[in-house]
Amino acid sequence: MKIASDPRAIANNSMAHSQKSIRDHARNRTHPNVDNQVISQQLEDLVKPCVYQQLAYYRSLGMRERILGLPLMLAAVLSLVWRQVPSARELNRMLARENLLWAKATCVSQQALSQRLLTFPASMFEKVLNDLLITLNQRWHQRNKRTLPRSVNYASQYFEQLWIVDASTLEALFRKLKSLESSSLGKLGGHICAVVDLKTRYPVQTWFDERPYAHESNFLPNLLDLVTPKTLLLLDRGFWNYRLFEQLIGRESDFITRLKANAQYEIISVFSQSPTHRDVLIRLGTGYQGNPNLKIEIWGLLNLLVRNELNRPSTYLLSPLDKWFPSLTCHEWLLAISF
């Protein structure tokens, strides 16, 4: 067996390995996915009414009624995503030879389509998505609901909202467009934060920050504006912030998050403890730099257990956490209680 001793060879091998871990980067696509008439019809039935409801907003932005207008552009971009069209050039070919959802086959120049993709307002997609979410939530409440875990049903008796909050850095841009050729290699796409309803699995709200290395704390003002009393938040540890915890407790909302390894706390009382669990009341924080001291219940060693001021059985909140955070079942978590 030959071992590469050249540093450049080692670097190339490691780069190739890291590239393979990103599926879209590792496999080049030359053809879009085959159309599925059933999926196309479902997308058209759901999205088309929302698109035409936004025509007034489209005109208010000063956008002209032309071939590449709102209905056609929404159909083209949606087809671009769900059929995984490899390039704008291929999208232009598809648009010329076949109907894309509700948009009829239309011949336009490649330059016109590319320019339109660069200048089309992102707020239009946001408006359509928000309208679509209203429809999806209404349908979810009207149809025969899927069986939810006992923990979710039980928690719903005490909380009006069960929300998951997480943020993620978007991966590097492909730089296929000429407008991106001057961008630095490996430029990340930004930072996105989403609030998802635990029961319906639909997004409640999303926020975007163009700075890829922006901390999750930049989304806290938006999150606090959204939260109402009797809300249970499942927070990623990136949202660890003493001020946030204090404000959530003041708003009569509860939260669950992972305990940081270097967190400073003092045990006030022990409710129960065994080789497989512990349930204690602590005073979190030392008051350093004006951070508040909070009374919080800490629980869980080998299992995720929850207790709070309502004396709900702690195991009822176990199953949704196992499902959403399967790799965290051996971590300690926090449940904020309004004392």
Image (tube, helix red, strand yellow):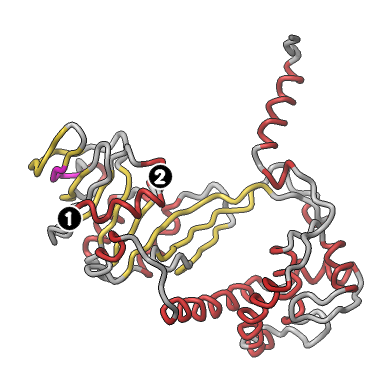
Could you classify mark 1 by the number of other residues whose Cα lies within 10 Å: few (under 14), some (14-19), or many (20 or more)? few
Q: Position of residue 65 (x, y in %)?
A: 78, 88
* Image position of 130 with respect to 170: above or below: below
Query: Could you tell me which residue is drawn at 38 percent across and 69 percent down?
Result: 226
Give, as a three-letter code, the residue at label 2: Pro
Residue 107 placement (x, y as % from top left): 91, 77
Q: Which residue is identified by label 1? A: 313
Residue type, label 1: Pro
| Disc 1 + disc 2, Cβ < 8 Å | no
The crowding category of the residue bearing disc 2, from other C-alpha atoms within 10 Å (few below 14, some 14 to 19, many at least 20), is few
Q: Main secondary structure of the magenta part?
A: strand
- Can residue 290 be seen here? The reply is no
Q: Would you name the residue on which mark 2 appears?
A: 326
Is residue 336 left or right of 169 when viewed as pictured? left
Q: Residue at x 29, y 42 (%)?
A: 259
**Which part of the image, by quadrant, shows the N terminus?**
top right
Q: Quadrant of the C terminus?
A: bottom left
210 over 238 or under it: above or below:
below
For residue 254, the mark is none
Q: Is residue 207 highlighted in magenta?
A: no
**x and y percentages locating residue 94 in the rendered image:** 86, 68
Q: Residue at x 10, y 41 (%)?
A: 272
Tell me which corner region of the image, top left, top right, bottom left or bottom right, holds residue 220.
bottom left
**Residue 77 x %, y %:** 73, 69
Mark 1 secondary-structure assignment: loop
**Which residue is the extreme one toward the bottom?**
56
Left or right, 319 with reference to 306: right
Residue range of the region highlighted in magenta in the rendering: 279-284
Q: Is residue 43 visible?
A: yes
> In this picture, is 181 found above or below 3?
below
